[in-house]
Amino acid sequence: MSILRVEPLTTARALRGPFDYRQPAAMDELEVGSVVRVPFGPRRLLGVVVELAEVSDLPPERLAEPIEALEAGAPAELVELGLWVAREYCSTPSRGLQLVLPPGTGTGGRTVRSKRELRAEILPAGEAALSGGERLGVKQRAALEALSAGEMSAPELAAAVGADRAALRRLETRGLIASRSSRLRRAPGASGLRAPAKRPDLLPEQKDAVAAITQALDGRRAENGPISPGIGPSAPSFLLHGVTGSGKTEVYLAAVEAALERGRGAIVLVPEIGLAPQAVARFRARLGDRFAVLHSALSAGERYDEWRRLRSGEASVCVGPRSAVFAPVRDLGLIVIDEEHDASYKQEGDPSYDARTVARKRAADSGAVLVAGTATPRPESWLELPRLELPNRVDGRRLPPVNLVDMREADPRSGPLHPDTWEALDAVRAAGAKAIVMINRRGFAPWLTCRSCGHHWGCPNCDVSLIIHRHSGRLVCHHCAHIEAAPRACPQCASTTLSQAGAGTERVEQLLAERLAPMPVFRLDSDTAAARGAHASILAQFGEAASGVLVGTQMVAKGHDFPEVTLSAILDADATLRFPDFRAEERTFAMVAQLAGRSGRGEAGGEVIVQTLAPGSASIEHASRHDSAGFLAGELERRRLLRYPPFSHLVRVNLSGEHEPKLESAALALATELRRALPSDSDLLGPAPMFRVRNRHRRRLMIKAADRERTVTAVRTVVERRAADRSLRELAIGVDVDPQ
C-alpha cells in the first residue's frame, strides 16, 4: 500500500499536517506536488502531496482516499521551496505551498483549469465527397469547403460558414472529418509599447559583465560573496551596479540568451510589472515564444496558461514581479533581480517573504547564477555580493546636473512648486521637450480642517487623516478605503471656511495643467493606474506625445526610458526622512537618484531639480552627486555602530484586536515568553502601540538578533503556541522576518 502525505490548504494557523491518505490504484500517477481534493472531517479540502511513503502510523482501515486529482501540480523542488518559505518566515505550510501552486488553486476549493476548444480537419473521404456526387447539406458542404483550406476550430467554422457543432458531429459520424479537443492558450495582451528586436553593440564594460555571468553559467567561477544564514550552499552571485541609463537591461538580455544557449531557463524579476512595461516589451521582442509573463494584473486563465507553459517547458524565461520567483521554470540557470533596491520585493502579507532572499535560496538549490542589478544598491548587497560595474551611460553622455532647491527660503504662498521649478518647466514647454515631476503622495491634499472651529476630518476606522480627492469629490482613507463625500461646510459649526493643506499628485497635476497649457499633463499613480492596462497606456501616451509632463508618485521614477525628458523634478524630497525608520536615508537616496536618472537620456541633455527642506542631509547630498559608493560607505558604518542589518537580523511581531485591554495583556505576555525563548544576545523592544487601522488596535514587538536561525525558530515556536490558545482567537498575530 502506498501512502500519500497531504498538507491541506487551509487558513488555520493552529492546524498542522501533513495527514496520511491511502493512494488509490486509479491515481497511481500522483507524486510530490500533486494537488488533490481530500475528505477532511465533514469537509472536502484541496491539499498538496508533500511526501510519498510506504507505511503510516494509522491502520489501513482508518485511512481515507483522495476524491479527485487536479490536472496540474507543482514540481517537487518548488514544494520544498514553499515549505522552506513557511518555516523561514514563520508562516504555515499551507500559505507557503500556495505560493508555488498553479494560479487559481485556493483554500476555498476553487481551481482554474485549461480552456479547451474543438478543432476539426477534413479527411480524404471528405475531399472525395466535395468533388463527387455524395449528398451534402448546405452547411455541411460549406464546412467541408472551409476545412479544405486547413484545420479550423468550431468557433471559427461557426463564424465563417454558420456550421454548428451538430453539423460537425454529423460530418464526423459519416467519416468525412476528424475532430479533437485542443488546449486553447489565453495569451496576455501586449502593453502597446514597442521595442526593437535588434541586439545593440555592447560597451566594453557591458561585455565584461556578460562574460563574467557566462563564465559562472559554465561553472568556471568559484569565488562568491557570503550568503545569508539558513539559505544553504552559496551560488554564483553578482551585483550589477550601473548608473541609470548604463544598459543593465541589455546585460540581462544577453545573460538570458547565454542561459538559453546552454539549455537552461531564466527568471527575471522586476519591482512591479505595471511599472516596467518597457522592459517587458524588450524581452518579448527579443525572446518571442520562449518568454512568459506572470503577474496579478493578468486574468486567472491567463496566469494559469502562462504557468503551464513554463511547467511544460514550452516557455523557458519568466518575467514578473516578486511572485515570479516561484515560477516553475525548468532547469533554472539564471535569476535576475532588476532594481534590487526596491522595497516592493518584500511581501506585506503572510508569509512576509523577501523575493530577493528567496531568489538566493532558489539559485543555491538549483545551481543557478544570481544577478542583482541597480543604480542604487542596498547596503546589504553592496557589502555581500561581488560587483560588476557599469560606470557610464550607453550614449556616452554625462549624468544630468542636480540642483538642490532649499524650500526653507521659499514663500509658503507660492504653493508646492518653487519659482525655480516653474522657470525650468516653462523652458521645457518652450523647447517642446518633456518633463517628469514626482511627489510621493497621491490625492489632492492630505488634510482638511475647518478654519473657524478647527474641526479635522479623520477616518472613523483608523487614526489617520482622510485624503482629499478632488476629481472624485471624495475624502478617502488610504488604509481602510473608507470613503465619504467631500463636505461643503463644517458639521460642527456650519462654517464654509474649509482649509486644504498640503499637496498630492492631483493638485500638482491641476497646477501644471493651468500654468503650462496647452502642453499635455499625464498623471501616473495608483488611482489612475487602477484599471487593467492603464499604467502602460499612460506611459505609451506620454511616450508618443510630442511634448508633455508626467506627474506622479514613485511610479514615475522606476525603470522608464524616455530620451525626450530634459527635466526631472522631485517635490518634498525629504518626506521619507521624517519616518522613524533606520532605512529612511537609504530610501531617500534611492528615490532621488532614481528620478534623477530619468532625465538627460537624449541629445538635448537634461537637468534635475530637488525641492527639499533638508539640503544638507547625507542621502540628498550624495544623490545630487550621483555618488552611490560615498553614500553606502557612510551608511554601512552607521549601521555597524547601531547593529542594524546587514550587521544583525530583525524580526517583527505584530498583534491586532478590537479590544485594546485584552490586546495589551496578550502583547505583554507574548513579550515575556519571547524573552525567555530568544538567544541571549537578542534585543527585544516593545510592545509598542501603533495607530488604529480598520477599527483594530495594534501592538508591535521588534527583535534585533545576531543568530538568525535560532531567533526565527524561537519566534515561530512561541507564536504557534500562542496562536493555538483558544482564548486569543479574536486576536491576530503576524510575524515579519526581515521587515522593510
Image: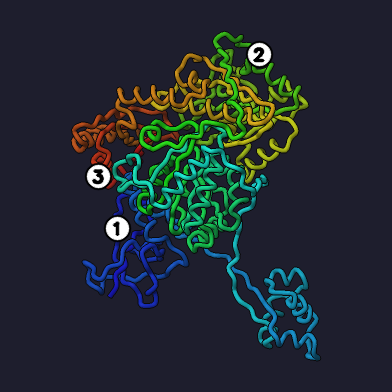
Q: Label 2: how many residues lie within 10 Å, few (<14), some (14-19) or many (20+)?
A: some
| Image x and y of residue 491, in percent | 58, 22
State the CA–CA distance, disc 2 to disc 3. 58 Å
Q: Residue drawn 75% across and 80% down? A: 144
Q: Which residue is mark 2?
A: 419
Q: Is residue 418 above or below residue 99?
A: above
Q: Residue drawn 49% across and 18% down? A: 621
**In what element is the residue under mark 2?**
helix
Q: Looking at the image, which is closer to me, 571 or 331?
A: 331
**In what element is the residue under mark 3?**
helix
Residue ranking furthest to the front? 204
* Residue 727 seen anywhere in this rendered image of the structure: no
Mark 1 belongs to which amino acid? Gly
Residue ranking furthest to the bottom? 133
Numbered badge on residue 543? none
Q: Which residue is mark 3?
A: 717
Mark 3 belongs to which amino acid? Thr
